[in-house]
Amino acid sequence: MDSTKCSAQVERFEVVETGRRRRWTDDEKLKIVLKRLQSPRSVSSTARRYGISRSLLLTWQRSFGARNRRFSSFRLL
């Protein structure tokens, strides 16, 4: 046998699809922010519950707070 002969080696790997970016409406964002403010949950646990990052939730919270300082007084039914 020829010692310089190369054998093809195939490696198997799996492609994990992350999916498309989620588009959140302003109503959905506000609902999530209000849930976070009305419950004793931490920011991280609320973000995990909705499948978003902690920083995104805080960004939405600041955004709604800048638009309307009274938004934290709303009650979800």
Image (tube, rainbow, N blue to C red):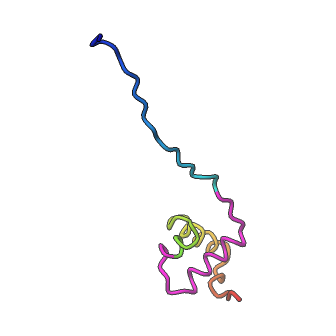
The image shows residue 11, relative to residue 68, as above or below, that is above
Snapshot quadrant of residue 10:
top left
Please report the residue visible at 45 percent of the width from the left and 38 percent of the height from the top. 12
Snapshot quadrant of residue 77:
bottom right
Residue 38 placement, left or right of 30: left
Residue 41 placement, left or right of 76: left
Q: Where does residue 5 sit, x and y in percent of width and height?
A: 33, 14
Front in this rendered view, residue 70 or 74 = 74
Whether residue 1 is in magenta: the answer is: no
Front in this rendered view, residue 3 or 17 = 3
Q: Where does residue 70 sit, x and y in percent of width and height?
A: 65, 83
Please report the residue visible at 61 percent of the width from the left and 76 percent of the height from the top. 33
The image shows residue 73, relative to residue 55, as above or below, that is below
Q: Looking at the figure, which quarter contains the N terminus? A: top left
Magenta segment, which residues?
Answer: 22-45
Q: Where does residue 38 sit, x and y in percent of width and height?
A: 58, 86
Front in this rendered view, residue 11 or 29 = 11
Q: Where does residue 56 sit, x and y in percent of width and height?
A: 55, 64
Please report the residue visible at 50 percent of the width from the left and 67 percent of the height from the top. 54
Snapshot quadrant of residue 66:
bottom right
Q: Determine the residue located farthest toward the front in the rendered image.
A: 1
The image shows residue 6, relative to residue 42, as above or below, that is above
Residue 66 placement, left or right of 2: right
